[in-house]
Image (spheres, rainbow, N blue to C red):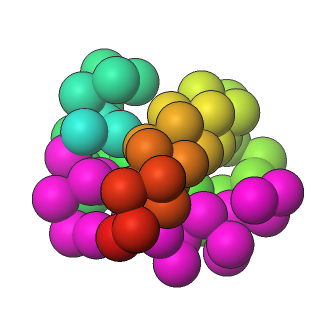
Amino acid sequence: MDTIEEIKQHLEYGDWRKVGKMVGVSRKYAIKIASRPTSKLYSQVFDAAKKIAQANAGLGI
């Protein structure tokens, strides 16, 4: 998983809440940041989403 689009395929609705909590923002803002690569928090959201997506892929979700 190298792009945000590949990561989004492995994320469910509730996972965005986890991503937001890891970064310190709301669920809606985490989703918005993920669609804005020039955002200051993009790398943090990307890393958090990638971590959760890899865990989901390992569980077969």
**Residue at left offset 40%, top offset 68%:** 60
Q: Quadrant of the C terminus?
A: bottom left
Query: Can I make out residue 10 in this image?
Result: yes
In this image, 56 relative to 20: left or right? right
Give coordinates of residue 55: x percent, y percent: 44, 45
Looking at this rendering, what residue extends furthest in the right direction? 2
Considering every residue shown, the one lying at the far front of the view is: 59
Is 19 one of the magenta-colored residues?
A: no
User: For residue 32, which quarter of the picture?
Assistant: bottom left
Q: Is residue 6 magenta?
A: yes
Q: Is residue 32 visible?
A: no
Does residue 4 appear left or right of residue 8 in this picture? right
Q: Is residue 43 above or below residue 46?
A: above
Tell which of 39 and 10 is nearer to you: 10
Find residue 15 and report its horizontal and vertical position in percent: 27, 54
Residue at 21% over, 69% down: 13
- Would you place residue 20 above or below residue 1 in this image? above
Closer to the camera in the image, 40 or 17: 17
Tell me where the magenta segment starts and ends, as one range: 1-17
Instruction: Pick the quarter of the image with the N terminus.
Output: bottom right
**Which residue lies at the image location 67% right of the left edge and 75% below the top edge?**
5
Residue plotted at (47% across, 69% down): 10
Residue 53 percent across, percent down from the top left: 49, 54
Quadrant position of residue 19: top left
* Total numbered labels placed on residues in the image: 0
- The spot of residue 39 in percent (x, y) is 67, 42
